[in-house]
Image (tube, coloured by chain):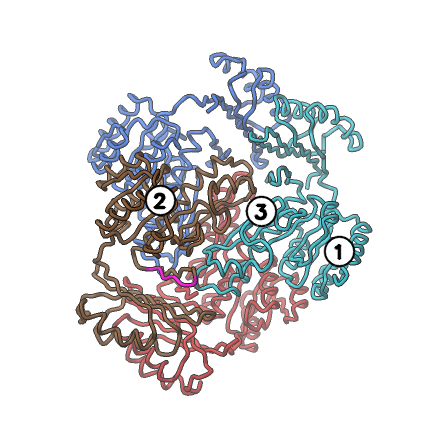
Chain colours: A brown, B cyan, C blue, D red
Amino acid sequence: MKKSAILLVSCPDRKGIVATVADFLYKHNANILHADEHIDADFNLFFLRVEWDLTDFDLPRDQFVDTFNPIAKKFQMEWRVEYSQDIQKVAIFVSQELHCLEDLLYRYRSGELKCDISLIISNHSHANEYAEFSHVPFFEISHTDKVTAEEKITQLLNKNNVDLIILARYMQILSPMFVKKYSNRVINIHHSFLPAFVGARPYHQAHERGVKIIGATSHYVTESLDQGPIIEQDVIRVSHRDAVADLIQKGKDLEKIVLSRAVRWHLENKILTYANKTVIFD
Amino acid sequence: MKKSAILLVSCPDRKGIVATVADFLYKHNANILHADEHIDADFNLFFLRVEWDLTDFDLPRDQFVDTFNPIAKKFQMEWRVEYSQDIQKVAIFVSQELHCLEDLLYRYRSGELKCDISLIISNHSHANEYAEFSHVPFFEISHTDKVTAEEKITQLLNKNNVDLIILARYMQILSPMFVKKYSNRVINIHHSFLPAFVGARPYHQAHERGVKIIGATSHYVTESLDQGPIIEQDVIRVSHRDAVADLIQKGKDLEKIVLSRAVRWHLENKILTYANKTVIFD
Amino acid sequence: MKKSAILLVSCPDRKGIVATVADFLYKHNANILHADEHIDADFNLFFLRVEWDLTDFDLPRDQFVDTFNPIAKKFQMEWRVEYSQDIQKVAIFVSQELHCLEDLLYRYRSGELKCDISLIISNHSHANEYAEFSHVPFFEISHTDKVTAEEKITQLLNKNNVDLIILARYMQILSPMFVKKYSNRVINIHHSFLPAFVGARPYHQAHERGVKIIGATSHYVTESLDQGPIIEQDVIRVSHRDAVADLIQKGKDLEKIVLSRAVRWHLENKILTYANKTVIFD
Amino acid sequence: MKKSAILLVSCPDRKGIVATVADFLYKHNANILHADEHIDADFNLFFLRVEWDLTDFDLPRDQFVDTFNPIAKKFQMEWRVEYSQDIQKVAIFVSQELHCLEDLLYRYRSGELKCDISLIISNHSHANEYAEFSHVPFFEISHTDKVTAEEKITQLLNKNNVDLIILARYMQILSPMFVKKYSNRVINIHHSFLPAFVGARPYHQAHERGVKIIGATSHYVTESLDQGPIIEQDVIRVSHRDAVADLIQKGKDLEKIVLSRAVRWHLENKILTYANKTVIFD
C-alpha cells in the first residue's frame, strides 16, 4: 500500500478551481492516483476528491493546512485533507440481530475494512462471543435508563477517540444531541428501500403491501428517524411465495452488503454530503 | 400455438383440492401443459392455475361451468376458466408521454402481446400518429368537463366490449365508480418504486430524497391513488451524477418493461389477486 | 417447525400423474404445504416436488416405499421421499480463501442452514480457528500425494456418513472416481459467470476481457471441470475503475450468496437434475 | 442546451497533465461542465474527458488544434476535441429482427439520441415501413454477392458522410477491411453475456447450458467475431421454466437497452478505448 493523501473539497462552482488545485499539487510534486469531481448545476456547487502518492510530495503534513488555506479561502471551500496511514477508530452498536456485526468483523479481520474496531456496544449480551473471537472489547449497556446509557456510551467513545459509529441493527434511538455531536459519523442500516417503510418492522410492512422487490438502505443518522443522507441501497426480488420470514432471510444478505459498502466508502474518505444527499466518489 | 384452457381457482385451503381437480381433468382426458399453485398459510388460502391442451379434452366448452360447479361449490371456490383462443379487447389510455404506448404497440404488432388493441384514448392529440401507424382507432377526449369525458369513454369501452384498460402514463384521475366497474381490469404504470413517492412528479421526489436506486411499478387501479395490488416492479441504479432529467430518461426504460410484463401476465391469465396483493403464476 | 415429508419425482410426461399422486396423498390424509411441478416439453419430462405435513398422515415411514412403488412403476418414475426431521451431514472443503467457509458457518450457527456440518477438510491450516469457533472438527490433509489424500478424505466421509460435500473455494481437483461416487452431492462455487471464464483465475480473465459485469456460479461437480449442472448464478456491475483486486473483492460477496443459496436449496430438497441442468423448486 | 466542447485525451501517466490542461482551459475562460479522469496503473495510462461551456470560451474553433498541440505533444497525447453542436450521421444495419431498430428509431424521434439517422440498410425488406414512418431513407442490399454488397454499402456511407454504424441485429459478417476502415465506429449488439456464447444462436446455447441468468452485450466491432471492446452489458434472470422462446423474448428487452446505451454514450463522446477495453466516462 502506497502512503497517500486525500483532499476533499466542496465549494461554490466557478472558473479556475481545478486549475488552481491541480497547479498547487503539481508544484508540490504530487503524483495523482485518483481524481473525481462533480458539479451540481442546480445548487451551483463543485465537489472534488483527489488522492495522491506522498512519496515525492514535498509539502510536510504539518504545513499542508497553512499552505492550502489561501486557496481554500479564495474559493470559499469547505475542505479537509486525510492521510491513508491514519487508521480510523470505530465503534459498532448492535442489539439482538448479529448478522451485520458478524459480517463487519469478518471483513475487518480479513483486511477489507481498514480501521481499528475499538469497541462493540450492545444492549444485549449475545454479541459478546463474536467480540471475543475478534479480540474487540465488548460493553453491555442497558437502556432501561436512557440518559445514563448515553452518558456511559459517550464516556466510552471519548476514551477511545472514536471516529465512526456503526449502527449494525441497533434497536435503540439515540438522542438528537448525541446525533448532532457525531454528525456524518454515525452510519445506520435500515432494512427497507427508503423512503418506503420507515420505522419499525419494515419487512412486515413490505409483506403487507405486497411489493415485488425488497431493499436495504445505509445512511448517515440525523435527528429525523430514517431521513438522513442515503449512502447506499440494494434490492432483491421477492414473490407471493415469500412469507415474512423469507423476506427477513433474503434481506439479511442485502443489509450486510449495503452496510459494509457504506462503511468502506466512509473509511476510504469517498463520501461528501450536501442537501441531505451524498456524493460517492467511488 | 396449441388451443388450451386455463382454470384459475382461489379458495380456503383444505385437504383434497388438488386431488379432486386433477381427477376431474384426468377423467375428461386433459393433457396438462402447466400447473402452479400457492398456499398462503396466514390467510389459509389456496390458489391454483392449471392449463391444459384442449385437443383430447372431452368436455365441450358450453358444459364446463355446469360440470365443474359441484366441485367449486364443495370447496367454496372463486374460479373462472379461460380459453387461449379468446382474444381480449384492450383500450390504451395515454397523455403526453408516449414511450409506454409506443412500446406496447410494437409488442402488439410483433405478436408478443396476444390481444386486440381496439382503441387508444387520449386527452391530447400527440398519440394519433402512433395509432395510425398501428391501425388502431384513436379518440381524443378532453377532460375539461370530467363527467362528460368519462361518459364518452364509457360509451367507447362498451361499444368495443373492452376487457382490459391500460393506463400508459395517463395523467387523468378516473372516478371511483369507473374504477370499481373495471375492478382488476385497469393496469396503471407508476413511475416510482411504490410505496415510495406516490402522487405527482415521483422522479423529482426521488432526486430530492437522494435515493441510489429508482424504480417503476405496475399495479391494478383501485379507488385509492397508487395503492392498488402491485403486479410488477423493477429498478435501476442512479448516482449523484444523475439530474432529474437523467432519472426520467432511465426510468422510461423501466416503465416500458414493467408495464408490458404486467399486461402480458394479465392477458395470459396468470394473475390472481387477494388482500390487495397479487399472485403471479409465471 | 412442522414435521413434513417431501416427494420428488421425475418421469416421462403423460396424463394422470398429478391426479394419481394427489389422490394417493389425499387418501393417506396428507395436508399439502407446498407443491410445484414442471414439464419440459422438449424432453417430454415431468417433474414434481410436493411437501406435506406429517401430523395427520396415516402412512408410516417404513411403509411409504412399498405403498408408493406401484405408482412409481406405472409412471416409470425416478423418485425419492425425504423427511424434514432428517438432518443431512455436511463436509466443507476449503483452501486458503475463507470467506465462503466463514459465511456458511455463520448461516449454520444462526440456524439458516438446517444441517449438521460434521467436518471441515483443508489442504491448509488457516481454517482451523473458524472450525474451532463453530465447534466443527477440522482435518488438514495435504495433497502432495493425491491418491493418499483422497483415501484419507474418503475414510473421513464414510466414517461421518457425509451426505453433502461443499467445495467452498477448494483449489484441489477431485478424481473422476470420487466425483462419480458423490454424484449430485458435491456443490462447488466457481468465481465467474459460467460458461465464461472456466478454469484458473477467472477474475483476471474477466479483467483482461474488459467485461462490465462479473458473476459467480454454484454447480454440482461432474467429471468435466466447471461443466456440471448450474444451480445458481448472480452478478454485479464493474467498470473501468475496477482493478483485479476490486473484482476479487466484489466477487467475494457474490460467491458467498450464490453458494449459500445452492446449499440451502439442496438441504431443503428443492433441486432436481436432468440433461446437465437443474430444476429449482423454490 | 448549452453549446459545449469536449476534450478527450489518452496518454502515458505522468505528473502535471491535469494541471496543464486545466490551466489551458482556465486561461481561455472555459466554464467546465463535467470532468472525469481515469488512471490505469497497470498500463501507466491516463485518460481524461472534460466538457466545457463555449459561451465565454475565447479560443475560436479553428484555432483550437494549433493552440492545444504543443501540450498534446509534450504529454504524447492521443486526443480529439468534439463540439456538441456537431450532429453525427448514423447508419443502421438490420436484418429480420426489428426490435432494436424500432427502439433506436423511437429514441431518435423522441430526441433521446442526438444524431442524424441518415439511412437504414438491410438484406431484407421488412424494415422499410419503420424507415418510412421515421422518414429515414431505406436501402435493401442483398448479400448474395458479398463483394458487390459491401461496395454498394460503402458508396452509400461515403455519400452520406456516415460517422457511426449501428449493427442492430444485422446477421451479415462485414469484411476485415471494412471493419478496419470504421474502427471504433461500428457498434454491434450480441445477444449473449460475452464472452459466453459467442457466434450463432446464443439463446439456444444458453438454454442448452442451463444458465440461470442471460445477458446482452454491445461492443465495437473488430476483425475477430464478438471479440471487440465491450461497451455495455446487462442481464436478466431466467429459470428452468423458460424455454428458448422465453429467453429470446426476455433477451429482446436487454438487447434494446444495452445497444441504446452504447449508442448514446458514443454519440455523447463518452467512450475511450485501449487494450481491447472501453473507458466509459458517464
User: Badge 2: how crowded within 10 Å, few (<14), some, or many (20+)?
Assistant: many
Q: Which mark is residue B232?
A: 3
Q: Chain of mark 3?
A: B
Q: Main secondary structure of the magenta part?
A: strand
- Please determine if labels 3 and 2 lie on a single subunit: no
Q: What residue sits right under mark 1 in the picture?
A: B119
Assess disc 1: are there few (<14), some (14-19) or many (≥20) residues with their C-alpha within 10 Å of its C-alpha: many
A274 within the magenta span? yes
A125 and B142: which is toward the camera: A125
Residue sitting at x 68%, y 42%: B1
Q: D247 or B83: which is nearer to us?
A: B83
* Badge nearest the viewer, 2 or 1: 2
Report whether C140 appears left or right of C236: left
- B165 and C167: which one is in front? B165
Q: Quadrant of residue C231?
A: top left
Residue placed under numbered mark 2 in the picture: A168
User: Residue D270: where, in percent of width, then height?
Assistant: 44, 68
Secondary structure found at label 3: strand
Residue B232 location in percent, x, y? Answer: 58, 47
Q: Which residues are magenta?
A: A270-275
Task: Assess disc 3: are there few (<14), some (14-19) or many (≥20) residues with their C-alpha within 10 Å of its C-alpha.
Answer: many
Amino acid type at circle 1 is Leu
Q: Give yes or no for residue D220 being in the magenta stretch.
A: no
* Dot 2 amino acid type: Ala
**A38 left or right of B206 in image:** left
Among numbered discs 3 and 1, the one appearing first in the sequence = 1
* In the depicted structure, whether residue D197 falls above or below residue D39: above
Is residue B99 toward the left or the right of residue C121 in the image?
Answer: right
CA–CA distance in space, label 3 to label 1 = 24 Å
Is D237 placed above or below B173 here?
A: above
